[in-house]
Amino acid sequence: MLLPGTTAEAVGDQMTELADLTRTAGAEVVGTDIQKRSGVDPAHFIGMGKVEELREMRLEGAFDMVICNDDLSPRQQRNLERELKVRVLDRTEVILDIFAQHARTHEGRLQVEAARLHHMLPRLIGSYAYDRQVGGRRGGVGARGGAGEQQIEVERRRIRKRMRDLEREIEQVRSQRHQQRTGRRSAELETAAIVGYTNAGKSTLLNALTGAHVQAEQRVFATLDPTTRRLALPTGREVLLTDTVGFIQKLPTDLVAAFRATLEEVTEADLIIQVLDVSASTVLDQAATVEKVLGDLGAADKPRVVVLNKVDLLGPLARRRAIGAVTSRYPAAVAISATRRSGLKELLGAVEKSSRGDMVDFEILVPYGGESVLAALRKVGGVERTEYVEGGTRAWGWVPRHAAQRFEAYAATAGRSASSGRGGSPRARRPRG
């Protein structure tokens, strides 16, 4: 629907996206229509003239389902189904259906079911006849579950109980993910989360960088379950890289709430790698959508590397124009092709630079024969230079503050001989921002 304050181009892009969502859900798109109105009809969402037009098309057998780009109230959905005698869905229900089809893990299925039930509960009216009774007698005063209870109330109570059970199970999932993140923290590695619009190439990028074998397809929401792999950076340092669920315009709030256990991988990450499909004509709108979701998650201010993916799909002139338009908003963006593995060296360099969060400089002395200490240090931090002295190898570099204690036994502190190599903590010359 084209309402005041929206543009025909923006609504057209949303309708194209809705058609892609519909096909991904398994339905065939036979037509689209946009109605221009000054406001939404509270009873039918669209005007009665459009309802009559659709009813005539329905009688001709033109379609057997209607999908609206905007969320419908239970009343609007019920009235449209009554008038058109077909199933009526809104954008949220299509997205929930896709998530239900693509959920592979126990965690994913739990979160999708919770979102669907939350969306379904206020829409039960019409699923059962109000005058249909479970039994032939009325329950007594204050009775619940009696023979005279309406079936819709039985179903509502069943759904609410299932939602409570799901909440407990999802809370257990959150606890398990917290334990997993704590375990990863014990490895003293920085973490990075790949985020972006759905179908921007996040899983393909994870596969290209780490050799993972995550399912990557040219369709929306191909990946729902987060996958974490180690990524070796040019200096030898390692970070933990996690692929996350894709974002989309009008991402259902029920879905965001239900997938909070998964989305915490974003909020807990040290670095955000934002992937943009630079070949999409709506790339800046998609970037704005991702920015909004990151803001809603409280992750908008985290260090970030912006990646312009799919440059191989553009010709030389179109590529220059697209990259120029995006880099005006993200000057440090890195252009790559994840499928052709081009630009990955520059991307790794940007990740190396941006993932140095709360770092401190150090100066340590490692006795000869303790080369494993320097190797371990390079995995979590960096060694800028070394010098061989009488007592061992003196090294200068940087390390995450939370990992500094691990190397305190090798601190080269002032006032001690160069050959002792023992002290309180690594000499922190200055913090790195």
Image (cartoon, rainbow, N blue to C red):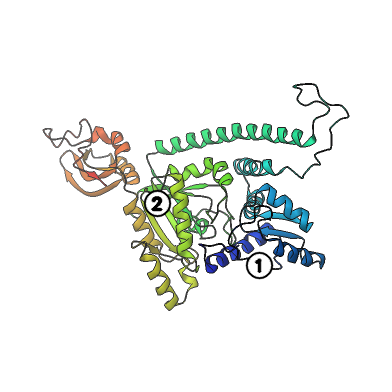
Residue drawn at x 71%, y 64% as measured from the top left: 49
Front residue of this view, candidates 214 and 46: 46
In this view, the residue in front, 255 or 151, is 151
Mark on residue 33?
A: 1
Question: Is 135 above or below relative to 83?
Answer: above
Task: Reply above or below: 117 against 37.
Answer: above
Amino acid tagged 1: Asp
Q: In this view, does 16 lie above or below 245?
A: below
The residue where tag 2 is placed is 232
Residue 105 against residue 14 in the figure, above or below: above
Packing grade of label 1 (10 A; few <14, some 14-19, many >=20) is few
* Horizontal relation, residue 334 to residue 397: left or right: right
Please give left or right for residue 378 compared with residue 209 in the image: left
Residue 298's quadrant in the figure? top left
Residue type marked 2: Ala
Describe the element under mark 2 as helix, strand or loop: strand
> Mark 1 and 2 residues: CB-CB less than 8 Å, in contact?
no
- Residue 393 seen in this snapshot: yes
Residue 119 position in % (x across, y down): 64, 44
Q: Distance between the residues labelled 1 and 2?
A: 50 Å
Report helix, strand or loop for mark 1: loop
Marks counted in the figure total 2
Neighbour tally class for label 2: few under 14, some 14-19, many 20 plus, Cα within 10 Å? some
Which residue is painted at 60% across and 44% down in the image?
108
Q: Nearer the viewer, residue 117 or 42?
A: 42
Asked where in the image residue 191 lies, by quadrant, the reply is top left
- Residue sitting nearer the eye, 169 or 83: 83
Query: Is residue 235 in view?
Result: no
